[in-house]
Amino acid sequence: MKLRELISLILLNLNQRKGRVLLTAIGVVIGSASIVILVSLAQGLQQNANEQFGSIAEMSQIAVYPDWEAVMPVYGGGGMMVEEVAEPDPITLAAMEEMAAIPGVKEVIPRSYLFAGAMMKFGKLESYANIIGLGTDDLSVLGYPMLSGTTELTKGSVIIGEEVLRNFYNPSLRPGQEPPPPPDLQDQTIIMEISKWVSDETGGGMEVKKSLRLKVVGIIESSQSEADYAVFMRLDQVSDINGWVMGRRFNPRQDGYDMAMVIAEDRDHVLEIADQINNMGFMANTPQEFIQGVNSFFVVLQVIFGGVGGVALLVAAIGIANTMTMAILERTREIGLMKAVGATNRDVLSIFLGEAAGIGFIGGVGGVLLGVLAGKLINVLGSVYMAGQTTASYGSPGVGISVVTPAWLILFAIAFSTLIGLLSGLYPALSAANLVPVEALKYE
């Protein structure tokens, strides 16, 4: 029997029993729709979780620190320290040159924090500052989204996070007065007041202050990252201030930096680079390590969700097997007649397997359509719910609820449903193929 004739005969047989076929296919529709909805929900949750961890630029960054964990003190009985605490290897210029030589590293940026307290003043407003010195002339390499201004960092200028603006307050504000709105500091000059404590010969001391005039050349848009509350300055300027605080000149070749940001050329090589930096005796942290664990969890979640839908398909498979078995009993004489006019066992087997696979295919297509439509409905309801939650929490961002249906899942659901139908019809089809023509023709 030719393939075209086989397909035509299968479609004809299915069309003659539309009611039974549709009722049987409903079970497959429910099972395949369950797989599509549940796996798509897990996909959407995974995508939302990854988006919360940071931008693409942040995924290619590695934060490198001195390995303090390797020099933790060892305590014996009675809480006595057994071994002295050693100093970890500092992040010196030589160490950063070694990091930059690792294949796949695009750039190494040293960082230092300010060793003293700092207060920003703008008119009558004040705010404490988290000052970070960066060894780069352009912050665009870090991928921070800019609200306004430029990413170019020059001496005597600062780039601040958007949340810093909301931290400004008026210290002379009286009770009951409305707090002032966040100031617009773009292209404005602020006063940075830095203080340190100097001891004297009597054992006492005094506070010494130093003021700097700094221009705000850029404001970083809030993105739930460290930059939201940071004030970025040039590294050499922060090093000079730290030298003033320590009472001696900062020597980067000996003192080293607090940390370094290693930028990878490709995010796919971040974990490999981090391992090589760890082997150098430093501590390398990257968001990719955490995301890798989260993605592993969501893969397991997708398998569990898919298994739940697979149970529904298993029930549908029993229904297909039952339908095909009943069809054989009803069509026994027809099978005998087919064999009497020349149909082979293979032809009969192909017809019944084709009908079973057809029921699975119809159910798979219906299940995919139902699953996609249900996913869109969940997305709409989720957006409405999250909008209400955002309003209730005064505009604070949250993790969204979304269903993402990839193309591979659609193809898998249809193919898997068809395969389930094929396997379910295997035993009834073999039974039909093995019928003896003479006995089949005498069957009442």
Image: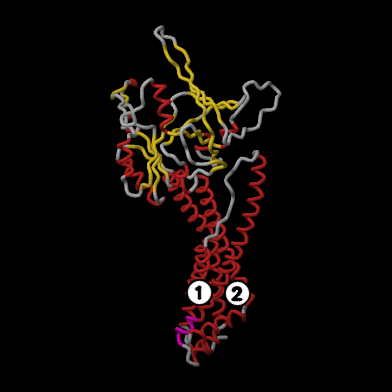
Left or right of 329? Residue 76 is left
> Percent x, y for residue 120?
54, 27
Q: Residue 88, percent across and down?
A: 32, 31
What crowding class fits label 2: few (fewer than 14 Cα within 10 Å), some (14-19), or many (20 or more)? many
Q: Which residue is mark 2?
A: 21
Q: Quadrant of residue 220?
A: top right
Please state which of residues 140 and 217 is positioned toward the viewer in this rendering: 217
What residue is pinned by disc 1? 425
Q: Is residue 39 magenta?
A: no
Amino acid type shown at disc 1: Gly
Where does residue 162 sit, x and y in percent of width and height? 57, 37
Between 364 and 194, the one nearer to me in the picture? 194
Amino acid on which disc 2 is placed? Val
Judged from the image, the secondary structure of the residue bearing numbered disc 2 is helix
Q: Which residues are magenta?
A: 344-350
Q: What is the CA distance from the residue labelled 2 to the residue labelled 1?
A: 13 Å
Q: Residue at x 37, y 40 (%)?
A: 284
> Is 420 left, or right, of 382 in this rendering?
left
In the rendered view, would you say 440 is above or below 302? Answer: below
At horizontal 39% and vertical 8% (from top left) the residue drawn is 201
Q: Earlier in the sequence, mark 2 or mark 1?
A: 2
Q: Secondary structure at mark 1?
A: loop
Q: What residue occupies the far top of the structure in this picture?
A: 202
- When the figure is inspected, residue 367 is found, relative to residue 256, above or below; the finding is below
Count of numbered marks = 2
**Observer-nearest residue: 271 or 405?**
271
User: Where, quadrant-wise, is the C terminus in this rendering?
Assistant: bottom right
Badges 2 and 1: C-beta atoms under 8 Å apart?
A: no
Residue at the spot x=58%, y=25% of the render?
126
Where in the figure is residue 191, as x and y percent of width and height? 54, 26
Q: Nearer the viewer, residue 76 or 59?
A: 59
